[in-house]
Amino acid sequence: MEITINGKPSQIAASYTVGQLVSELFSACGGGPANSIPGQATSGKGIAVAINQSVVPKSDWHTRQLSPNDQITLITATQGG
């Protein structure tokens, strides 16, 4: 099915949870969005997810199913100075 992640169209499996998406995008292999860090998905630390402009609590990530045409916004905390 097609969803949009941070403004970019993406194809995913028909039954996918927020937790699965975050794990895939922020894998320890460094395959996630810019500024992600290895292991970030495992802890969920520093990651925020919104679907159709509604924040999804981390406690719901593994049960919240994605739907066709969902607009996903992923935000990661970064350090700087």
Image (tube, rainbow, N blue to C red):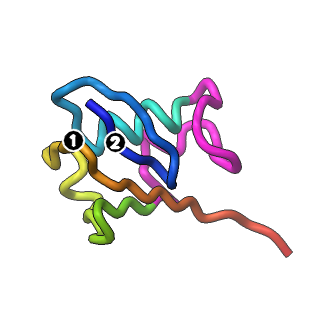
Give yes or no for contact between labels 1 and 2 (Cβ–Cβ under 8 Å): yes
Q: Earlier in the sequence, mark 1 or mark 2?
A: 2
Where residue 9 appears, x then y in whole percent?
Answer: 45, 40
**Element at badge 2?**
strand
In the image, residue 6 above or below residue 50: above
| Residue nearest the viewer, comparing 70 with 66 | 70
**Element at badge 1?**
loop
The residue to which callout 1 is attached is 68
Residue at image position (29%, 60%) is 51
Three-letter amino acid code at disc 2?
A: Ile
Q: Determine which of the numbered discs, if any, sits on residue 3 in the image.
A: 2
In the image, residue 54 above or below residue 76: below
Where residue 3 appears, x then y in whole percent?
Answer: 34, 42
Residue at image position (26%, 63%) is 56
Q: Which residues are magenta?
A: 28-47
In the image, residue 40 above or below residue 77: above
Left or right: 36 as drawn, with respect to 72: right
